[in-house]
Image: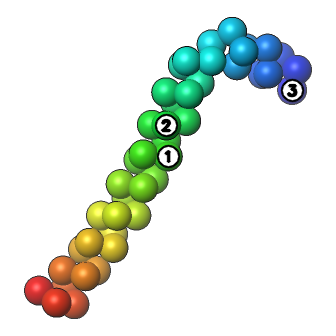
Amino acid sequence: MQKIISWYMEHKTYGNILIIGIIGLMLYNIGYGVGTAIYRIFG
């Protein structure tokens, strides 16, 4: 665990980009699913 924390501190920008990318993809997939469902109901 300590190794991961020290690696994260050294590569903080990469870690943040990775986390933002993962969250962005998750939100995109959820948004796409909801949008498709709404389109199917009302479309």
Tag 1 and tag 2, C-beta contact below 8 Å:
yes
Position of 37 with respect to 10 (left or right) is left
Q: Mark 1 = which residue? A: 23
> In the displayed structure, would residue 12 be above or below residue 39?
above
Residue at 59% x, 24% y is 15
Q: Quadrant of residue 32?
A: bottom left
Q: Is residue 30 left or right of residue 7?
A: left
Residue labelled with disc 3? 1
The residue carrying mark 2 is 20
Other-residue count near label 3 (Cα within 10 Å), few / some / many at <14 / 14–19 / ≥20: few
Picture quadrant of residue 4? top right
Q: What's the residue at 11%, 86% (across, down)? A: 43
Q: Nearer the viewer, mark 3 or mark 1?
A: 1
Percent position (x, y) of residue 38?
25, 82
| Residue placed furthest toward the top | 10
Question: Judging from the image, what secondary structure is the residue with disc 3 in?
Answer: loop
Q: With 20 as the anchor, is 8 left or right in this view?
A: right
Residue 13 in percent (x, y) is at 55, 18
> Of label 3 and label 2, which has the lower sequence position?
3
Work out how far the residue at label 3 is from the one at label 1, CA to CA, in angstroms: 22 Å
Q: Tell me the kind of residue under disc 3.
A: Met
Report if the CB atoms under discs 3 and 1 are less than 8 Å apart.
no
The quadrant where residue 6 appears: top right
State the scheme by which the image is colored: rainbow
Residue at the location (49% across, 37% down)? 20
- Mark 3–mark 2 Cα distance, whole angstroms, equals 21 Å
